[in-house]
Amino acid sequence: MIVSGSTSQSLAAALAEATGEALAGVEFERFPDGELMGKVGEFEADRAVVVASTVSSDAHIELLQLQDAVREAGAEEVVTVLPYMGYARQDAAFEPGQPVSVRAMARAISTGTDRVLTVNPHEPDVTDHFSVPAETVDAAGLLADPLPEDLVEPVFCSPDEGAIGIAETVRETYGGGETDFFEKTRLSGSEVEIEPSDTDVEGRDVVLTDDIIATGSTMSESVAVLEERGAARVFVTCVHPMLAANAHTKLARAGVETVFGTDTIERPVSAVSVAPVVADSL
Ligand code: R5P
């Protein structure tokens, strides 16, 4: 059965449809002292696939509870799908005294599962931190689906070299165009500087691709640079549309017309579902 965390209910339903596995009933409660309880309804299956994007600390707790609840209900195998894995960007102790948060989360998640799947993590070697078999799922190709077929001399561009693989996959799935990347310097958690490349974008459609839009700073700066250089239409795409705090406003003020992502994080801009690629890996 497919068991959904509160953060991944649309994706879990799509996954149930794609795999033919039943969607379990779930309930989420909060006690007066603030504690949470995620619980599963009638459970009749050997395998439980728990699907939960850990977009918040509460979502982490809920996931651990659902893993425990399905074992308690008799699941012999538990597979945990992390469409988006939170805390994965703190993948090193960058300053003395800091934790490797991704490792701490992976250890906790490993205790309640037999296997883990996660979609386009910030660094692919995140899988090394789990003590059970863990695999990554690449959903980048799906970002080509909502693009119009009439892109003019398209450039598929990532805001930094680290995300060029996503731009290349989207270009390949789209079936034509050029790839490119910018240089990004992070000034603070919410401020970045973007240095464009020499590629001539004047009059061309540009598809900006990244793994995640968090505060929207990276994308809004990238769009500003493209507008200065006379790009035609600019499409802003990402796998994980976190869009935290005022990210939407920032993007709108930068003149972004089209922004979309997948349902690894369920947002109004989640134009495409990762259910088919997750189902394949299941
Ligand atoms: C960083 O390396 C990531 O790939 C994203 O570019 C970054 O996390 C986006 O963050 P923000 O939207 O806050 O600029």
Image: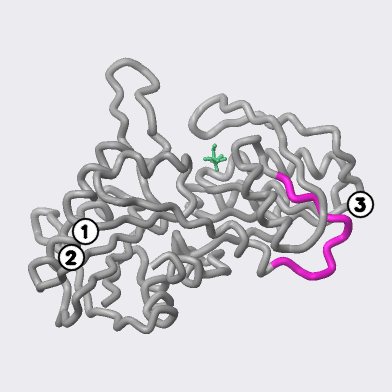
Question: Which secondary structure, mark 3?
Answer: loop
Residues in magenta, as a range: 147-157
Q: Judge by depth and name the residue closer to the eye, 215 or 250.
A: 215
Q: Which is more N-terminal, label 3 or label 2?
A: 2
* Residue 85 image offset from top left, x and y in percent: 38, 50
Q: Judge by depth and name the residue closer to the eye, 200 or 168.
A: 168
Residue hosting label 2 = 38
Question: Quick check: which quadrant has ligand 1?
Answer: top right
Q: Judge by depth and name the residue closer to the eye, 9 or 180.
A: 180
Residue at position x 69%, y 50% from top? 168
Residue at position x 36%, y 18% from top? 95
The reply to whether the C-beta atoms of the residues labelled 2 and 1 are less than 8 Å apart is yes
Residue hosting label 3 = 203
Verify whether residue 154 appears in magenta.
yes
Relative vertical location of residue 145 with respect to residue 252 in this rendering, above or below: below
Q: Judge by depth and name the residue closer to the eye, 9 or 215.
A: 9
Alpha-carbon span between mark 2 and mark 1: 5 Å
| Quadrant hosting residue 236 | bottom right
Residue hosting label 1 = 62
Q: Amino acid at mark 1?
A: Glu
Relative vertical location of residue 245 with respect to residue 282 in this rendering, above or below: above
